[in-house]
Image (cartoon, helix red, strand yellow):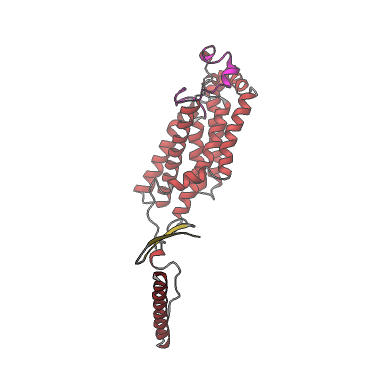
């Protein structure tokens, strides 16, 4: 009976609203069309809130590891197994060990890989914040978040995979020869530190920086070309520095493949928020509607698409 009484009351309320609309129409008062999301379900604000460095973090992380982006992470793992298993890592290291002069040209890459993103973020932030340029400020936040997520991801991988660097002094204690060393992974917790190991943090940071900017400024061909050149130079740098003793070649490839989806997801996400495309109500929203009756209390949960 409670349900019938509730239904009757709702019917009466709807009838009263219909009568009111009819009276207004008869008096010539214009009637605004009803908004299906009016009242408690109207979730879209009139103005987009200001961007912050952590804006959209959860959504960006999820996008970085979903769909084709997940395929890139899996490809990074597969190419590592293939390149190291076929001895390519050892062959590349031997090539650079015999040509130490090549590694000298990689010195700028080693420095830029560590301080480059920090300097770029600082410059973009200064121009955007003190220059009151909101678009540039959004770019600074995109690069910052992309690098933060990438750094956390790479650190966890290095701590748990324990891949030794291509150091000759490790032959004998870790593996029988350099080729065996290139195939070695010591899975566990902190069995290889976080400076060396798999994947390359220098390449990952460079890729996260360049891909986030390219996604934030999708119409800039110059940024894309500079990004490709920067990542390629960084991959060469970490593979050739100090006679090929910094990183295995597959470390460099994995760093690029794993950071690219993170950078593009974060950059595109900040671009959408900057343009107001993803502010307010999301494409799908959960709705919780309580229903309180005389004898029972119910909660209806649904999803709005």
* Closest to the observer, 255 or 65: 65
220 drawn magenta: no
Look at the picture and state if 172 lies above or below 276.
Answer: above
Which secondary structure dominates the residues rendered in magenta? loop
Q: Is residue 215 above or below residue 304?
A: above
Q: In the orientation shown, which residue stands out farthest toward the right?
A: 86
**Quadrant in the picture for the N terminus:** bottom left
Residue 22 occupies which quadrant of the picture? Answer: bottom left
Q: Residue 143's x, y, as percent?
A: 45, 42
**Residue 178 among magenta residues:** yes
Furthest residue toward bottom: 26
User: Which is more toward the observer, 58 or 170?
Assistant: 58
> Does 113 sit left or right of 16 as displayed?
right
Q: Residue 155 placed where, x, y %?
A: 45, 31
Report x, y in % for residue 106.
52, 26
Residue 124 shown left or right of residue 170 in the figure: left
Specify the segment rendered in magenta.
170-198
| Foreground pick, 70 / 250 | 70
Residue 102 picture location, percent across and down: 56, 22
Q: Residue furthest front?
A: 1
Q: Residue at x 51, y 29 (%)?
A: 200
Say if residue 90 shows up in the picture: yes
- All told, the count of numbered labels is 0
Q: Residue at x 53, y 33 (%)?
A: 255
Residue at 53 percent across and 40 percent down: it is 260
Left or right, residue 282 beside residue 224: left
Above or below, comparing residue 100 to residue 274 in the picture: above
Can residue 108 be seen here? The reply is no
């Amino acid at each position: 009976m409670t349900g019938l009484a509730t239904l009757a009351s709702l019917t009466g309320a709807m009838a009263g609203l219909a009568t009111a609309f009819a009276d207004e129409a008869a008096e010539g008062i214009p009637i605004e069309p009803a908004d299906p999301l009016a009242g408690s379900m109207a979730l879209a604000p009139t103005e987009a809130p200001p961007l912050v460095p952590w804006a959209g973090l959860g959504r960006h992380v999820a996008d970085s590891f979903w769909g084709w982006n997940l395929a890139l992470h899996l490809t990074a793992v597969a190419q590592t197994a293939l390149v190291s298993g076929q001895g390519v890592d050892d062959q590349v290291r031997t090539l650079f060990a015999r040509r130490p002069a090549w590694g000298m040209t990689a010195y700028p890459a080693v420095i830029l890989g560590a301080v480059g993103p920090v300097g770029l973020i600082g410059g973009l932030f200064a121009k955007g914040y003190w220059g009151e340029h909101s678009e540039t400020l959004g770019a600074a936040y995109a690069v910052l978040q992309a690098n933060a997520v990438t750094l956390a991801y790479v650190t966890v991988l290095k701590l748990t995979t324990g891949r030794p660097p291509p150091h000759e002094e490790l032959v004998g204690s870790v593996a029988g020869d350099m080729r065996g060393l290139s195939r070695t992974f010591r899975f566990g917790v902190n069995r290889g530190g976080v400076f060396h190991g798999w994947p390359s943090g220098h390449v990952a940071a460079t890729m996260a920086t360049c891909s986030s900017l390219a996604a934030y400024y999708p119409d800039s061909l110059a940024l894309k070309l500079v990004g490709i050149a920067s990542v390629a130079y960084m991959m060469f740098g970490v593979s050739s520095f100090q006679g090929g003793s910094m990183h295995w070649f597959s470390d460099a490839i994995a760093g690029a493949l794993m950071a690219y989806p993170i950078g593009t997801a974060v950059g595109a996400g900040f671009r959408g928020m900057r343009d107001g495309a993803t502010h307010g109500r999301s494409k799908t929203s959960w709705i919780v509607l309580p229903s309180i009756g005389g004898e029972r209390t119910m909660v209806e949960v649904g999803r709005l698409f």
